[in-house]
Amino acid sequence: MDILEDAGISGGKNAARDGFVSLLDAIEKRQIEALVIYSLERLSRDMLTLLAFERFLDEYDIELHTIEGTVNTSTPDGFMNFAMKAFLGEMERRQVKYRTRSAMEHMKAQGAVVGSIPYGFTRSGDALIENETEQNTIHEVNRLYCEGNTLSDICRELTAQDRLTRKGTPFTVMQVKRLITGYQETFKRQSTAMGSTIKDFICKVA
């Protein structure tokens, strides 16, 4: 019996979990007849991942068993137990996310600075103060935009003026766009690669 593990990994992207990816590869190569894990939480707390994974196992006629909670997907009742645990795990994940967001909003209401510092400001303790250099760049970007310059033109002009980002690199079109007050898209946004991938994923799983 082989044992695969994600040592020191909790949560995160599935693609970054070497043990999990190795498990998927082994299943696809039909090297596994049954899968035994300690609990579903050790596999994932994301309901979509768990349901998709169970469907993946079913495609290869592989049973899933857990030591804790006794899940056995070879029977309808066992699958229902699996689905309920997946749902409860998803609820717990969302509760943690909700509590974290609520705590951050409370800190903001108290005047504390949380998250990344917006361009144009500098952190001073729990307060934000204007950064004169960055504020000047913001004003210059908006001036150039109001004069009818394109985003690419603005990028080139900022570079010519030796105005760089915080990282010391030239501004990109996306970075300039964020600095423009009331920027209006002049084109229809095309579907993204991620959007297409998600669509394909849903179609194949459903």
Image (cartoon, rainbow, N blue to C red):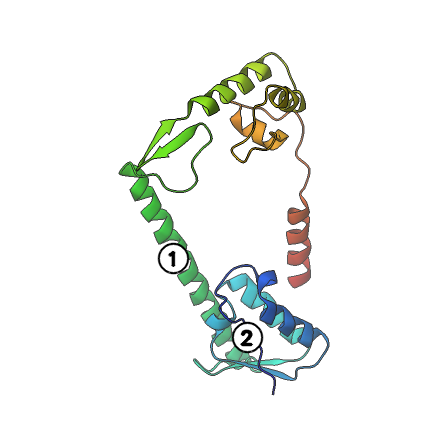
* Residue 134 appears left or right of 107: right
- x and y percentages locating residue 100 in the rendered image: 36, 51
Determine the residue located farthest toward the right in the rendered image.
29
Residue at left offset 68%, top offset 49%: 196
Asked whether 130 or 5 is in front, the reply is 130
Front-most of residues 131 and 103: 131
Residue ID at (30%, 37%): 125
Expressed as whole percent of the image width and height from the top left, the position of residue 23 reads: 63, 74
Residue at the disc numbered 2: 5
Number of marks in the rendered image:
2
Q: Residues within 10 Å of mark 1 (few under 14, many from 20)?
A: few
Is 132 displayed left or right of 47 in the figure?
left
Q: Is residue 119 above or below residue 196?
A: above
Residue drawn at x 65%, y 84% is 33
Residue 144 appears in the rendering: yes
Q: Name the residue nearer the viewer: 83 or 160.
A: 160
Mark 1 to mark 2: distance in Å?
A: 25 Å
**Badge number at residue 75:** none
Residue positioned 68% across, 37% down in the render: 190
- Helix, strand or loop at label 2? It is loop
Q: Are marks 1 and 2 in contact (CB under 8 Å)?
A: no
Locate residue 28, reporting x and y percent. 71, 73
Q: Label 1, on which residue?
A: 96
Of the two numbered discs 1 and 2 on the same chain, state the one appearing first in sequence: 2
